[in-house]
Image: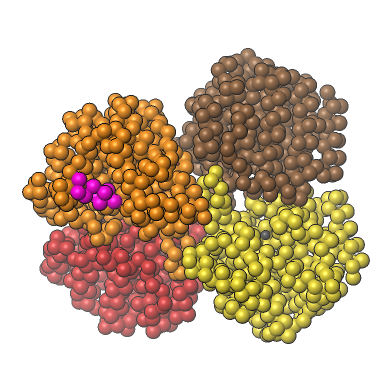
Chain colours: A orange, B red, C yellow, D brown
Amino acid sequence: MSVGIVWDERYAWHDAGRASNSPWAEPYPAFDRPESKRRLFALVEASGLMDHLVRIPARAASEAELGYFHTPDYIERIRALSEAGGGDAGEAAVFGPNGFDIARLAVGGCLEATSAVLSGRLDKAYALVRPCGHHAEPGRGRGFCLFGNTVIAIHHAQAVHGVKRIAVIDWDVHHGNGTQDAFYDSPDVLTISVHQDRYYPVDSGGSEEKGEGSGHGFNINVPLPPGSGHGAYVAAFERIVIPAIDQFAPELIIIACGFDAGMSDPLGRMLCYSETYREMTRQITALASKHCDGRVLICHEGGYSPTYVPFCGLAVLEELVAHRTAVDDPLAAWYARVGGQALQHHQETLIDAIAKGVQRSR
Amino acid sequence: MSVGIVWDERYAWHDAGRASNSPWAEPYPAFDRPESKRRLFALVEASGLMDHLVRIPARAASEAELGYFHTPDYIERIRALSEAGGGDAGEAAVFGPNGFDIARLAVGGCLEATSAVLSGRLDKAYALVRPCGHHAEPGRGRGFCLFGNTVIAIHHAQAVHGVKRIAVIDWDVHHGNGTQDAFYDSPDVLTISVHQDRYYPVDSGGSEEKGEGSGHGFNINVPLPPGSGHGAYVAAFERIVIPAIDQFAPELIIIACGFDAGMSDPLGRMLCYSETYREMTRQITALASKHCDGRVLICHEGGYSPTYVPFCGLAVLEELVAHRTAVDDPLAAWYARVGGQALQHHQETLIDAIAKGVQRSR
Amino acid sequence: MSVGIVWDERYAWHDAGRASNSPWAEPYPAFDRPESKRRLFALVEASGLMDHLVRIPARAASEAELGYFHTPDYIERIRALSEAGGGDAGEAAVFGPNGFDIARLAVGGCLEATSAVLSGRLDKAYALVRPCGHHAEPGRGRGFCLFGNTVIAIHHAQAVHGVKRIAVIDWDVHHGNGTQDAFYDSPDVLTISVHQDRYYPVDSGGSEEKGEGSGHGFNINVPLPPGSGHGAYVAAFERIVIPAIDQFAPELIIIACGFDAGMSDPLGRMLCYSETYREMTRQITALASKHCDGRVLICHEGGYSPTYVPFCGLAVLEELVAHRTAVDDPLAAWYARVGGQALQHHQETLIDAIAKGVQRSR
Amino acid sequence: MSVGIVWDERYAWHDAGRASNSPWAEPYPAFDRPESKRRLFALVEASGLMDHLVRIPARAASEAELGYFHTPDYIERIRALSEAGGGDAGEAAVFGPNGFDIARLAVGGCLEATSAVLSGRLDKAYALVRPCGHHAEPGRGRGFCLFGNTVIAIHHAQAVHGVKRIAVIDWDVHHGNGTQDAFYDSPDVLTISVHQDRYYPVDSGGSEEKGEGSGHGFNINVPLPPGSGHGAYVAAFERIVIPAIDQFAPELIIIACGFDAGMSDPLGRMLCYSETYREMTRQITALASKHCDGRVLICHEGGYSPTYVPFCGLAVLEELVAHRTAVDDPLAAWYARVGGQALQHHQETLIDAIAKGVQRSR
Ligand SMILES: [Zn+2]
Ligand SMILES: [Zn+2]
Ligand SMILES: [Zn+2]
Ligand SMILES: [Zn+2]
């Protein structure tokens, strides 16, 4: 089992600006700060897991590659703003000087990871990139995202590596609207998003959004209620996500992997902890073994707890590599016991209804 | 309507240490940092609301006053540790050099606020103190709390000001275990805690904990499921908290006021926003007008979002003072719309069951 | 002795942006951060000195008042940039959203302090404002400064309060170029700057810059070599600054008071410590008693050590008020002993040469 | 030219505690924070220089290795304190939980670098370790230093690799008292320290401290006055350091490399900039080529400017590797022009006097 990891120090140099421009708010850094990701990579190194991983160098995506998804106008606007010192790419997607270069490096990191897996050089890869990408639209950035990292990686897989059927499971706490939209009418890309109901974007992500045209049935949303925990996520996987991917039988599985559904995240209101992410990864890798020679690509999305994201990310990477380090999540024992971790009746009712709807749309 | 506020710069100097001592965790400041409270006071000043408030100077509580609740051994241990540079007062209650002095200043701030209200000098008072107090036990600190600020304020009200019947509503996201325990067998102090179910302490706060002996029926716990929002909190107030206090007819109402059930709190998993706190305050002040000549004392507990606590706290203070400033919560419009803000069926079922149980225990 | 202090929480909300826009520099906040000033004010409160001070509320300076010094174009440009989210006012003078309003509040704080003193309401006043002002030019901001706080205060003193002869001593570690330029041809305003030789601006501040026209002899620069300490500063005061002001016999003395010549300042390379600032203040207040009924106005400029500025500022304020608090500068004993604190031969030679030059120009 | 670099993420996890325990000081992190070193390593990666370097893994030094320099009592005390959550190793040498392990990793990083060079595997190595070591004494930590990294590396070189004659040049802004003391009576180790006069420790580092017994003449102190810049450092090198090492003809040259004599350092009061460090490195590497087959070992000491240390460190590493990256120090042009960079007369007089004294002691 050979597994790669992408991390470039410059990802930490992306400057997401201030949390608020309100005249009543003292300046404070935006929630998208480098700490959570940098500390995840640091834990990978400190734990010794790095000895089981291959470092994949990032590169800047070309403008042609960005153009798979984004309009020329948008690309040019970001380039120009970046040279002028930064700005807002659209809605809550602030970047600083050189932000264009860093965002291209994030896309390129995902592309290199894709190529490493699809060329057969590696079995799996984790692209620990920043800024994230799943909210980005063709013509504007949104929600800390500048370019659609995963969308472009999928196009790259199809255009360069000749892979056709790809499944994306996005477990970031926010809806993966950008990925959904990019392949809404395609039966070749199965897009699944498990997220907090009507959180961000507040008006997308409903379970009734199933794709259109020949893509109908190839988009699945699981909008879990706030307060969902380990039980709800595992149930959503076992009853919806895994059966759907299994039936789809993809050639590649991609995880859009945010950790903002985790405990102590300041944005998400969920209860996931390291074992939740470990279990979801286990189920995905098993499926990948069955359908795609084990090929799994992970693109990092959000996750804003500097203290807890590292333990969640390490669990995912340990599962990818099939090696347990000596690291012990110091919070897992407590987090496992807090109220609401087990599957709740109202969650089960919702999940089963969505599962039934998914079956009907096939 | 005359309203006082306690704030002392030294509250911001309390040093709650590191978030973790795990060998696998890079150092990070504990969640209890000064920013959220300091920024709340700053917004009170910047908004002009300070012109409608009277500043109440804090003072250090005496050891005799601490002794209302705490054992001599514990007091001495904290004093000695503080002189030696700090330590852990028990369970996750770290303090630094001079921590004893600051914690006494927090207690004393609550005592001065109590006296200001009960002497008739002011109608209401908000003690914006730090460290918090509602988890503290007689013989050990817990959960960022060193001394039982509110417990000692209640004893002070009774012993010094001759007030007998006091109602405490604790809406911090964590269970107010220390206050509950202190008056568990007393019919004179009605302790109510609305909190996230089995969060911290993970094994207390169930609705079956109703008091004992002659205090039976005078402790009410409302353990709301994670993910509860505006609707659930307002329902809990209207159906449980307000009727119970109304029936109790207290001479003084105290709010143990944490904002960690608010959006963007890294610890709480709830959805409250500024309007939730405004509404709860409105209901309490109305009740205070009915029963206790408007007397309300607020002791600040937790709340760990540096960017959002100020707007929640300002809403509470505006409601106390009955004056709206020009400040506009820049997040309220979004937060009002996110999924889960309305009362959910499973929340309503739980709240009604607790309400019925409360009625039965009278 | 009645002494006022200006501080407005919004001064801490000024956002000076990033330390560097270089593509090779990870983002880092600019050196001009709120901590040093906020912590100075906090120490004033915590020490009890506030009980000996009168708080003077700040107000926004009007555009007409800004127009005493700045061009209409510049004022309008800052206003527009501020509404658009901020920008750079010229050279290393970045500000954020609402920066125009905060900068006007800084000017207005100095104006209110001026009026408090010149109306006779108070004897002395310390305007603890932010951003600073002494580098600002009529048409551009420079070096963290947006508007010429002190320059405008001087015009205000002259235009509104009918004061004519004003002496300004600027002991910020950087050259007070803006103040020098504003009154370079005026014999009514004696501008003196004691600063680190050719530091910032790197090409102004030489001792040969003495004023022009009828203002010749009314500008004095004392460019001390880097590494100057207590002895050099006291000598510069005793041999140049004090005699010059004494001879000038002003109606008001203004101190442009930066603490960046202090120990542990990341920008200045000097050795001043709390006793240096105390001594310089003592000499100025004595002179003010002799010439101007004790009237002294202090406008805060730079100073970037969050840990040490508070002790320097407290020493100045204690001297103004003529009251010693219980506060003990924990670093003074060490700082007094480090190499270079005594007047060095090469410093003395320079100071005496400048003193001689000053005498010649009269 | 093969050059190695040691960096371990856990070096950034060392917790140096608070800047002050004074009751009048709001908590602030100690000056020894991880940023400056982490950002240096990050720049090495971002610049591409890492492609020209070999990463040397660190390891924990054994207690026997620590025992080369430290007393068993001291080692045991640090171990026990570390397990108990941390403490102060002596004088301003605070560490947190697991601090013993991290400090051993710093020593071990220097040992691995030593072995890499002396085994012939590499020509040169830079041990970017934390905490620093040059102030540590056998029985107590001092000034952010726990164990004598360099002292132990020298013993290791002698005991394990059979190297006898070693020259150490310490250009940290503080006196290298620990290294001086360890070899004060040895003619085999030439210890040279160029530092700010009587800064820290305030009572050691005078030029009259020349070694004792057979070690007389083998310790050289160059206590430069505060405010010294490029010219003074280069003159000290050309007139004292280089001739002394040249005459000594060592088998290995070690640089105890702090960057706290650099501009924008909050502790040092000197003016060095990237070109100063580049030039000093150039002179040392030339000497190493002449005397020791190019063998140079660098042990990182202090340096507290998070924004500027990276550029100084990169210059040193570029010089070691003999490769210039595309990185441009954005501050060098300004720093080169500030007053005091050229050799001053009083500095020259001092340097020449010390040079003469050195010649006499041979
Ligand atoms: Zn997200
Ligand atoms: Zn709480
Ligand atoms: Zn300055
Ligand atoms: Zn040093």
Q: Position of residue A286 (x, y in %)?
A: 20, 32
Residue at position x 65%, y 73% from top?
Answer: C70
Q: Position of residue A15 (x, y in %)?
A: 46, 51
- Choose between C179 and C119: the one closer to the eye: C179
- Which quadrant of the view contains residue A39? top left
Image-based side of D75 in relation to B250, left or right: right
- Which quadrant of the view contains residue A41? top left
- In the image, is residue A56 above or below residue B213? above
- In the image, is residue A34 above or below residue C178? above
Q: Position of residue C228 (x, y in %)?
A: 77, 53
Does residue A348 appear in the picture of this structure?
no
- Which quadrant of the view contains residue C48? bottom right
- Choose between C325 and C67: the one closer to the eye: C67
> Which range is magenta?
A178-186
- Choose between C121 and A306: the one closer to the eye: A306
Residue at position x 49%, y 33% from top?
Answer: D8
Image-based side of D192 in relation to B48, left or right: right
Residue at position x 71%, y 76% from top?
Answer: C154
Q: Which quadrant is home to the C terminus of chain A?
A: top left
Residue at position x 68%, y 18% from top?
Answer: D292
Examine the structure image and report whether residue C177 is included in the region drawn in magenta: no
- In the image, is residue A193 above or below residue C148? above
